Image (cartoon, helix red, strand yellow):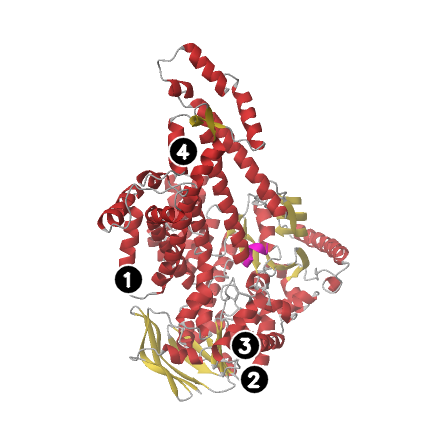
Amino acid sequence: MIKIEDLSVSFQGRTAVEHVSFSIEPGEIIGIVGESGSGKSVTALTLMGLLAEQASVDSGRVTFDDTVLLEAGRSIDKRLLQKFQGSRMSMVFQEPMTSLNPTMKVGKQVEEVLQLHTELKGEEARKKVLSIFDEVGLKNSDMVYESYPHQLSGGMRQRVMIAMALILEPELIIADEPTTALDVTIQAQIIALLKEINKRHHNAMLFITHDLNLAKTLASKIMVMHHGQIVETGTPEEIFTNPQDDYTKMLISAVPQRKKRTCNNAAQRNQKSSAAKGLKSFEEDEDNRKSIAEQIIENLQNVEKEHQEQCVQNGSREILRVSDLDVFYKEGNNSLFGGKKKKQVVNGADFSIYEGEVLGLVGESGCGKTSLSRAILGLNQNYSGQIQHFTERPQMIFQDPYSSLNPAKTIGWLLEEPLRVQKVGKDDRKQAAMEMLAKIGLDETYYRRKPSELSGGQRQRISIGQALITRPHFVIADEPVSALDVTIQAQIMDLMMNLKEEMGLSYLFISHDINIVYQISDRIMVMKDGTIIEMGETEELFSNPREEYTKILLA
Amino acid sequence: MKYFGKKLVSLIITLFMVSVATFIAFQIIPGDVVTSILGTEATEEREAQLREELGLDKPVVERYVNWMGGVLKGDLGTSYRYSKSMNEMMPVAELIGDKLPVTLWLAAIALVLIIVISIPLGVLWAHSSSKFLDAFLGVMTQGAMAVPSFFLGVLVIYIFGIVMKMFTPGSYISYHTSFAGFLGYLIFPAIAIAIPKIAMTARFLRNAMLGELKQDYVRTAYSKGCSKNRVMYGHVLKNAMMPVITFVGMIIAEVVAGSIVVEQVFSLPGIGRLLISSISTRDFPVVEILVLYIAFVVIFVYFIVDMLYRVLDPRISGR
């Protein structure tokens, strides 16, 4: 149906896609997997005719049935492309918030596709939009029609995008990382929806993702892209059981797996369950949430006590104790007369962290995990309950290595900064920075470089170095690998594990991705709507989750 | 409704503070209205008599309270310097009422010119892929913004008045005599006011549109099969107008509050000229009311801008 032959695309002389050929047959789901910069999105945009003006097609062509949509050396026929765009092929983008026009009702935005390609008008068009909203699982389609993007949740916005792509039943839907910006539970729903649509309408789908596992669940054929080339093509089984290319092998090994771990402190401790007992009803019973939450908290306190006793027996020192912590934040009102509202974001958190332990904290965006870490760090004083530090204040590793390093300073300066605050002498500072560079796996030449010369993974190494240079005992890592590619993620996780053993650190490791937390943590806490709903030894929690919500996260 | 209440209260507080500040400023700056009226040769008795007539012999606070009380009752006071007839001074309300239409009409014409020309120009500029047009408009707008307004006024008089003979410079026609003639004369000072503002607004709109064109939703619109025109007018323009509205609001406030330099160059009897002469003659009642008027215009225009935002941007009214 669609044929891409020998396609090469470059941006101002830099090649983004190199001699790529493949074809898509009706009803087929093809997954393109690759890391950022691998050319997977550029391939999709070329196919859609959405390349930026600076891009040039150096070789090859794209044919849709018998029509040549694009050919190297020929000027782009925009009229022709516009006829295909939206009606015979359509696209779902990554970020549903910014991909919808913020000042236009979403119903109108979907209806625009009808205006462009059909004769439908007025009430008829509206009806068609409402019916497609129903089909993609948007309840209250009337209300959704009249909503603006900011009034909808991320999942609903992505459903609107899918409705927009689906409304004229195109032969090809291209989905570019359609779930990356969404929470885990919503991700699963969107993937299920895409699968269902494919089954019902038999349209072909090109699914672009960085996540091999996701491609495996959805696609019938997977193509792995690396440096603008397709390095391997095959069915998911072939790719996973018998990868041929070295890069594919590396990609598969880097995917967080729940493999059995050896050598951790948890194994030395009693393996007895310490998960909260029998409180599945938190989700279902809306009315009694508060009392159930209290019950959970009480149970967890008992669990904590047990754990504490064991740790004391083993001679581990307590590093941090959080008891009965409620965290609030003020909703500022900037006008002259507005009062301040207080909003509770963490509810009754109660836990301790011991020497050499890694405590994982898992939850979706908005669950309060970052608010909890800010309270522990002392950045938010607006809390009740107790936070006791038994060592010096913790250090922090941040999520985004691109924006958290001052671009004007050298790496050496950045690494020395925490020591400068502590008034350490110049020579000692430099020596400590050099030692830290060696520890984080970078050579001495990096001392004089600037952050802009470093890759994302290298920058995150610097952030880690900054956190560790004062030789703390306790480090909070808030989504330290979420902004990185999978292969880099694995390297950073290794580094963090090694440094932990070497320097005897304790981590509070925060992530939305339970599989990453699994790799490193001794114990895991699951947080939802501000409450820690489940806590347990990692293996125990994985093999025997108590809460429905935890099961969804694990699925 | 609560929102309106808050806005109203803050308007009143601001106006009160402005009036106090103006009053205090007048106490501090050197120069005395009595000496300015009678000259330095007057006898002390005559000075004291005039001081009493004007109420200047009373303590500062009492004078302010009396003045404020009058204003609240709708009596804006009388000018110290302008007389209505031989033995009656000109009430401030009448004085300003006579000059305000000149400034307001001038502002209205200028604003129509600014909006009607700058918005299509900005869109055209953002839309065009012609390198020549881009460079041409870039140089033209930069030039228009850089030239000081008095020189622009002189230039307009020279080109339209002396070379093209479209009007006779200095022959201002009062709106009492002929309204059409009045408007016909005002067009030229309005052009002088509008030119730099048109340049600024067009440039601002172009930049806003180019910024919006980089947004993800533009790519979505293209993926639906929208043409460039449809993307520009159907999606980008409305979003790009948001910052432009604030900008135009600032310009409106500036123009309505009086274009002092241009009124001077074209010798128009508007608010701007009245303000200058009243300050130099220490005509306190006139200055105080004019300053309040300007403060009110600025706050009111910003209020309207705020309202417009609420109508145009659903993200704001939703909160």
Residue flagged by tag 1: what amino acid is it? Leu
Marks 3 & 1 on one chain: no
Residue flagged by tag 4: what amino acid is it? Leu
Q: Which numbered disc flags the more N-terminal residue, 2 or 3?
A: 3
What's the CA distance linking mark 1 and mark 4? 42 Å
Per the rendered image, the range of residues in magenta is: B314-319
Mark identifier at residue B133: 1
Q: Chain of mark 4?
A: B
Mark identifier at residue A121: 3
Residue flagged by tag 3: what amino acid is it? Lys
| Label 3 crowd (10 A; few <14 / some 14-19 / many >=20) | few
A24 or A255: nearer the viewer: A24
Residue A107 visible in rendering: yes
User: Which residue is drawn at the image coordinates 59% and 69% (left, top)?
Assistant: A145
What's the CA distance linking mark 3 and mark 1? 38 Å
What's the CA distance linking mark 4 and mark 3? 58 Å
Q: Which numbered disc flags the more N-terminal residue, 1 or 4?
A: 1
What's the CA distance linking mark 4 and mark 2? 74 Å
Q: Are marks 3 and 1 in contact (CB under 8 Å)?
A: no
Residue B207 visible in rendering: no
Q: Chain of mark 3?
A: A
Q: Which residue is label 2 attached to?
A: A201
User: Which residue is drawn at the image coordinates 50% and 76% (left, top)?
Assistant: A115
Q: Secondary structure at mark 1?
A: helix
Image check: B84 left or right of A111? left
Which quarter of the figure is the C terminus of chain B placed in? Answer: bottom right
Q: Position of residue A545 (x, y in %)?
A: 68, 66
Q: Position of residue B25 (x, y in %)?
A: 45, 26
